[in-house]
Amino acid sequence: MQKRISEMSILEKVDLIGKKQKKLQEKYKNLSKGELFLIACNEVKKAEEMEGKYFEYR
């Protein structure tokens, strides 16, 4: 069973961001590590916000 992002500890979120950053690096080879990190953080933030909205209206 996968944990919701909003229930993850900070270390788990960092690990998730690192994994997303590695996947993005394969896809976007010309971006810097900082840009990839920012994109990965934004993806995790959007997913967390979507979880909150989904469970809020449930």
Image: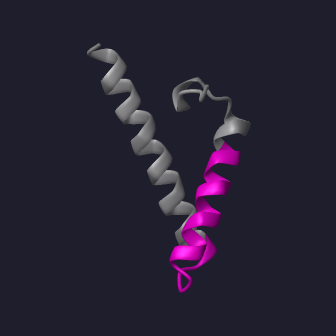
- 21 or 26: nearer the viewer: 26
Q: Please, which residue is most extreme toward the left here? A: 57
State which quarter of the image contains the C terminus: top left
Q: Position of residue 55 (x, y in %)?
A: 36, 18
**Does residue 20 belong to the magenta stretch?**
yes
- 49 or 24: nearer the viewer: 24
**Which residue does the image show at 48% across and 62% down from the upper left?**
39
**Which residue does the image show at 51% across and 78% down from the upper left?**
28
State whether the magenta stretch is mostly helix, strand or loop. Answer: helix
Q: Is residue 17 above or below residue 23?
A: above
**Which residue does the image show at 58% across and 23% down from the upper left?**
7
Tell me where residue 32 sits by quadrant: bottom right
In the picture, measured across the screen, residue 42 lies left or right of residue 10, that is left
Count of numbered badges drawn on the protein: 0
Q: Is residue 1 above or below residue 47?
A: above
Q: What colouring style does the render use?
A: one colour
Q: Please, which residue is most extreme toward the bottom here? A: 30
Residue range highlighted in magenta: 14-33
